Amino acid sequence: MTQNRFSTSIDGDRLERIDGSLNALEADLDMLIALTVDERRELFKMGTKSHAFCSTALNVAQQHAGLMPRDFDIDEFRRDHLALEILRPRAMRLAHLAQRMADTELALGSDVMAAALEVYGVLKVAGKDKGVDEARRELASRFSRRRPTDETPPKV
């Protein structure tokens, strides 16, 4: 093979541990929610600068609870703030792991595609009259362009 960006094999024991870990994470994080695209768009976003603002606001609200409206739930504010402080570093670790997983998947897919193209290239050149015409046609279908049928108007 001409390309090998990544090489590994995953044995059954490791795969079982990975799946067990993922199952445990999913079970332990069952309180997480999923937002719609519209909900994400409408929500306030808390960036780096906003973190200090929110921490200060929590301290001020706790110190001056008497100024806050009766329906303002300082305890809920505190719980949300604490939950964010707990989840954020773990979310960052998971995001980093997910990016490495995506990069590895990309590299492996590229290796597999490069090897498949090499096989196809060999069949195109050296496979004539070797009994692999059907296999070559099957691989060639990946690159075929659909031709308009009588029912489909041609693209202009």
Image (cartoon, rainbow, N blue to C red):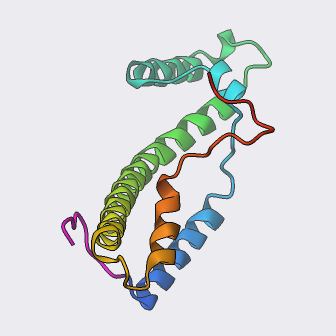
Residue situated furthest left in the rendering: 2
> Camera-side residue: 104 or 17?
104
Q: Position of residue 147 (x, y in %)?
A: 63, 43
Compared with 80, 43 (above or below) is: above
> Camera-side residue: 22 or 67?
22
Q: Quadrant of residue 106?
A: bottom left
Q: Is residue 74 visible?
A: no
Q: Position of residue 135 (x, y in %)?
A: 48, 76
Give the quarter of the figure containing the N terminus: bottom left
Q: Position of residue 87 (x, y in %)?
A: 50, 47
Residue at (69, 45) in percent of width and height: 33
> Camera-side residue: 7 or 129?
129
Compared with 80, 132 (above or below) is: below
Residue at (28, 75) in percent of width and height: 126
Mostly what secondary structure, the magenta segment?
A: loop
Q: Report the number of discs.
A: 0
> Camera-side residue: 17 or 120?
120
Q: Position of residue 89 (x, y in %)?
A: 41, 46
Compared with 116, 155 (above or below) is: above
Residue at (62, 39) in percent of width and height: 79
Give the residues in magenta. 1-9
Give the quarter of the figure containing the C terminus: top right
